[in-house]
Amino acid sequence: MSDPGSLLEAARTGDRRALGRLLTIIENQDPTLRPILPRLFAAGRGAHLIGITGPPGSGKSTLVSALTRALRDRGRRVGIIAVDPSSPYTRGAIMGDRIRMMEHSADRDVFMRSMASRGELGGLAATTWQAVAALDAAAYDPILIETVGAGQSEVEIAGLAETTVVVEAPEMGDEVQAIKAGLLEVADIVAVNKGDRPAAQQSARYLRAMLSTAGGRVGRTPAPVILTTATTGEGIDRLIEAIERHTREARSPEQSRARAVNQLRRALAELAQRRAVAHGAWLTSVEAVAERRLDPITAAERLLGS
Amino acid sequence: MPADERQDPEQPGQPDERPTPIRVLIAKPGLDGHDRGAKVLARGLRDEGFEVIYTGLRQTPEMIADAAEQEDVDVVGLSILSGAHMALLPRVVELLRAKGMDDVLVAAGGIIPDADLAALREAGIAEIFGPGTSIGQIARYFRERARRPG
């Protein structure tokens, strides 16, 4: 049993080994995957997709672990995808998110998968959205998607997740940081983690004051700012309540359409790149662009046959 | 993957035809609290192009096998300095086999007396790397022996 079709069927009935192998086939974009992709997406049960993003060291993994504990207490089966960066030089990666997840590692109702970003720059791997679909088909709900440690503009997660939680640590900057465009703008909820630090209250106040002016989020309610201490569990219940309150807004027709547009754009970009690279004229096109005999736009149009 | 080849400073502009990275789980079974060796190896394997999942200290064989199953790794590397290797290492292999993961390469490193090597190999530990082993040697071994992903 190694064809993706049987793996998908087995994963849907609770076979964790099959789900693990299916995720590898997805991650490697094995050619055998293509025929079952429609079935994979059709098998989705509509799990709540929750993105967890924020700067390196803000406590994303610890917060994911604390959320998982609280969700398990509520009887939910939790799926987790944690993305870490790949080296642009060697393609190697170190994925350390399991270190914080130790307490859940033998829990049959928690499934966690680490993914290397493999050259993607938006904070996710190119195949994360398909991996999420596999966890959804296997009846994990919610699915927590932890991004690469994000700077200011790794906002891909907002196109995939229904609810995006931006995790900030205290003393990360002043009010101007809070009104810059980018990461905070995509937050549906802001968690100020390490809430036991002296400056945590102050940071939460800054963020609340600035986000309540609503800036980029025209027509949307300001993101609530919640103080959490992931290591003790303080504030986690309030965070879960905020996530649950956000579900309805996340599933409005406008939001659903926005996510669909994002998925289509991603699928189109991948398809176009695959076609172009497989095209007989790929290498000569690269040469022509490198030697400035051809501009990249025209080269791309020719490779796609337009 | 087209996205890779744009980012890759080694082969700019070329479609990436290198094989998919090998996934390795590095775990520390049992109670010893020294993981410098495991971290150095994780870092070294990263530089050799492996995708390394590091699970941290004080893992039970059950936790390691469950992590290997979810991560669908090609290699499990066990680092142990405590002396409990005869109890813990064969148990990891047993649990992996019980999950149908017979094709996963299991290797060990750390402080393991020569007298125990044969018994560990018998129990399914493919190779045992002692002090002084270079990262290059381990990387080469994993590349030669790991099942191909996918």
Image (cartoon, helix red, strand yellow):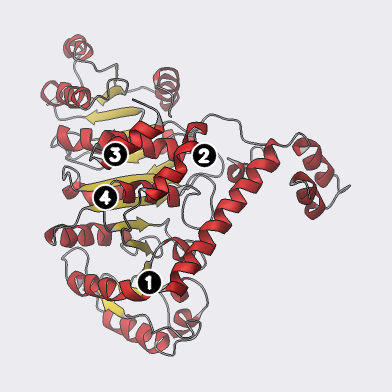
Q: Residue at x 40, y 18 (%)?
A: B145
- Report the chain holding disc 1: A
Q: Earlier in the sequence, mark 1 or mark 2?
A: 2
Residue type beneath disc 4: Ala
Q: Residue A158: x percent and y percent?
A: 45, 66
Q: In the picture shown, does residue B79 fall above or below A253?
A: above
In the picture of the structure, the residue carrying the numbered disc 1 is: A250
Q: Quadrant of residue A240?
A: bottom left
In the picture of the structure, the residue carrying the numbered disc 4 is: A139
Find numbered disc 3 in the image and state the secondary structure of the residue it sits on.
helix
In the picture of the structure, the residue carrying the numbered disc 2 is: A91
**Distance of mark 4 from mark 3, alpha carbons?**
9 Å
Q: Residue A165: x percent and y percent?
A: 35, 69
In the picture of the structure, the residue carrying the numbered disc 3 is: A11
Residue type beneath disc 3: Ala
**Distance of mark 4 from mark 1, alpha carbons?**
20 Å
Dot 2 crowding, Cα within 10 Å, few <14, some 14–19, many 20+ = many
Q: Residue A263: x percent and y percent?
A: 51, 58
User: Can residue A28 be seen here?
Assistant: no
Find numbered disc 1 in the image and state the secondary structure of the residue it sits on.
helix
- Report the chain holding disc 2: A
Q: Earlier in the sequence, mark 4 or mark 1?
A: 4
**Distance of mark 1 from mark 2, alpha carbons?**
35 Å
**Distance of mark 2 from mark 4, alpha carbons?**
32 Å
Q: Earlier in the sequence, mark 1 or mark 3?
A: 3
Nearer-the-camera pick, A9 or A156: A9
- Report the chain holding disc 3: A
Q: Residue at x 13, y 20 (%)?
A: B86
Q: Do the residues under discs 2 and 4 have CB atoms within 8 angstroms?
A: no
Find numbered disc 2 in the image and state the secondary structure of the residue it sits on.
loop
